[in-house]
Amino acid sequence: MADEIKLEQQHGKSRVRVGRIWRKKQGGQHFFVEWIVNISLLSNCLPSYTHADNSDIVATDTMKNTVYAKAKECSEVVSVEEFAVELGKHFTSFYHQVTTAIIKIVEKPWERVYIDGQPHEHGFKLGSEKHTTEVVVKKSGALHVTSGIEGLALLKTTKSGFEGYIRDRYTVLPETRERILATEISSSWRYSFESLSNVPLKPLYFSERFLDVKKLLVDTFFGPPNEGVYSPSVQSTLYHMARAVLNRFPDVASIQLRMPNLHFLPVNLPSKDSPTIVKFEDDVFLPIDEPHGTIEASVSRSWSRM
Ligand SMILES: O=c1[nH]c(=O)c2[nH]c(=O)[nH]c2[nH]1
């Protein structure tokens, strides 16, 4: 008896880089985005694997060209999510072979520069944290939209501690209520829109939501400007940040957060001959990024109701 063979496949184009300028009709303001696009198509092209028959393949070179063609077609500023949805819609409706399109895009953080407090019409500088999206479009019109942020580096110099954890013979970490808390957040959140027909049509809806979620994550991490908020662990802060987003934004169904704990070690330099060179008094630190703790969790609405 012949072995039963199962073949699952997808193909696509990775790291298609595109820049797009939009010019305001009145006034001289320019808008600019740079996107790195990954496309992956699930399609009925099995004969290309099994019988050297390529007649059902969408060439990955064609996928790449489609990115440029669709960027050209966007006559108004669009969010990175909207652009991903447009691409997904195109691939799943234009080719009868394509059943699902998975579009992932990273937007480089080009930010308008301000000169003497005034926004520059056509000048941009590279910021730090990136806006990402992952969109899955099915031929049926079913849709998943995820937005995300990468590289959001935050640090606070107090109002952080870590106590009460398991102690055993390998534990040397002292308990503390005074430490630096530093992290570089990666987060992604899934919207509750489940089909192309109920995705919001308001221009730049997703761009606004991205900024709102980012602000809420940052505000929750730090607390109010003068008193801050005490963090008993990265875990607790992460959970509060995730809950804040779910509480504030009803269109967010779930959120994932990854928060490395970037350690700042106390510096103590004893001296053979007194006096001590450096005695740690919550002031001088050795920053390290390896190794670092990694705390990650996913929080979703249905889970929170359980
Ligand atoms: O906030 C923290 N969570 C941990 O799980 C952990 N583990 C550790 O060594 N330090 C910390 N800090």
Image: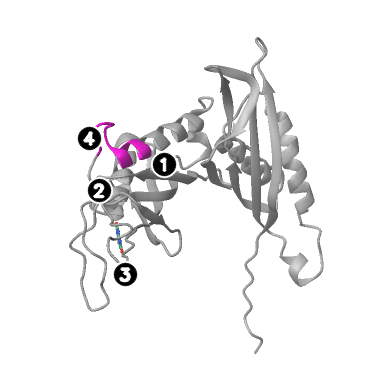
Look at 51% across and 31% down and name the residue there: 207
Name which of mark 2 and mark 3 comes first in the sequence: 2
Q: The residue under label 4 is which amino acid type?
A: Glu
Name which of mark 1 and mark 3 comes first in the sequence: 1
> Is label 2 in a helix, a strand or a loop?
loop
Residue 227, numbered label: 4
> Is label 1 in a helix, a strand or a loop?
loop
Look at 63% across and 37% down and name the residue there: 86
- Going by the image, does 284 lie left or right of 150? left
Question: Which-is-in-front pick, marks 3 and 4?
Answer: 3
CB under 8 Å between discs 2 and 3: no
**Where on the image, by quarter, is ligand 1?**
bottom left
Outermost residue on the left side: it is 164
Q: The residue under label 1 is which amino acid type?
A: Ser
User: Residue 11: x percent and y percent?
Assistant: 69, 58
CB under 8 Å between discs 1 and 3: no
